[in-house]
Image (spheres, rainbow, N blue to C red):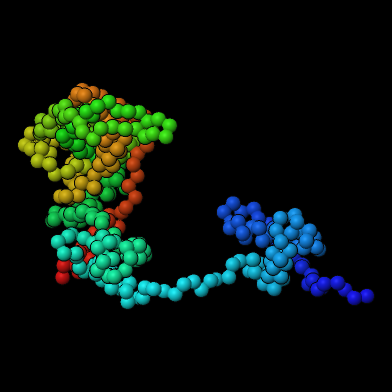
Amino acid sequence: MATIGRPKKPLVVTEDERDALVRLTKRARVNRSLAFRARLVLACANTPKSSDVARRYRTTNATVGKWRQRFIEHRLDGLYDEPRVGAPRTVSDEDVEAVIVKTLETRPAGETHWSTRTMAIRAGLSHTTIGRIWRTFGLKPHITDSFKMSPDPQLIEKVRDVVGLYMNPPTNAVVFSFDEKSQIQALERAQPILPMDIGQPERRTHNYLRNGTLDLFAALNVATGDVLARCKPQHRAQDFVAFLREIDASVEPALDIHMVLDNLSAHRAPAVHRWLLRHPRFHLHFTPTYASWLNLVERFFGLLTEKALRRGSHSSVPQLREAILAYVAAHNEKGKPFRWTKTADEILDKMRRFALRTQQVHA
């Protein structure tokens, strides 16, 4: 008896292929079309009629037959879309190179840097094409960054000294990172702050009233993360000595005290020198000139500014002092120290590489 229609090739799915197909149907981020094709193949392996599979998944017999045949011929690879040729390139490699060279080596007339539109006019391309080229090669003419190489003749020795205190502190001693945050302004917004609401961020006026300033003295215990803080009207040598007395009273008499601090003139005043001679357990370690990033307490100052000062509104200096001390108390309750990870060799090697690149640019 003659058969009706074309005979179908048998569709046999191995256990490994079945597991792979099931995974494709269950993956949360898989392409929806790919998951649909995997379901069709699994259904065809259990149901001989394509029409039944098509009716079950609300598609056509041609679609079921297409992916059934693709799987038989190419197995799992047949379920993926074939690479498409796409439209021919309209921007050549020479055009891309010319844009990069112009970006790096030239400037627009009367301006300090290129924008996508000014470069598009110069290069004869669209501004979207210029943007894609810049993103591909990591070029950002609109962004500028600052740097300052320390001219300290004892740079290497000071870096090794300070980093050594952070990573390998001496025994029977306490290490403090000390600095002043000077001229903190008590800024009051010109109008009341409107609180955050559903679908609406917190709102504040751009202008404010200045209600005075104060200076913050802070010593960060490197081992525990606790901060000893005092607010002063100024940061003179006698104020620094008074703060040293407070540190002295807070540390057990049997322990030495090592302090990392910057090169402010008040730290080297004769009054400070005389006080240190009477208290030999204090050892001062100065950071290199223009290297305040090496002072660990600066990380605490950054958090203080971000979380307690920048968005605050203070009508008086006492209110500002209360806000600062409240943040310090909350910080000390957490008891989590900052962890220094870069070794002195890594820091110095990075500075060496940067200096070499800078020298090549200006050669």
150 in relation to 252, above or below: below
Q: Nearer the viewer, residue 172 or 360?
A: 360
Image quarter for residue 7?
A: bottom right
Compared with residue 203, is residue 145 higher up or lower down, i.e. above or below?
Answer: below
228 versus 144 height, above or below = above
* Residue at the image point whose x is 30% and y is 57% from the top: 346
Residue 188 percent across, percent down from the top left: 22, 28
The percent coordinates of residue 288 (x first, y second) are 17, 50
In what quadrant of the picture does the C terminus appear? bottom left
Res 355 visible: yes
Q: Nearer the viewer, residue 40 or 74?
A: 40
Q: Residue at x 32, y 28 (%)?
A: 194
Residue under the image location 34 percent in, 32 percent down: 202
Furthest residue to the left? 270
- The N terminus appears in which quarter of the rendering? bottom right
Q: Residue at x 27, y 25 (%)?
A: 192
Q: Position of residue 134 (x, y in %)?
A: 32, 64
Question: On the image, which quarter does residue 42 sit in?
Answer: bottom right
Q: Position of residue 56 (x, y in %)?
A: 75, 54
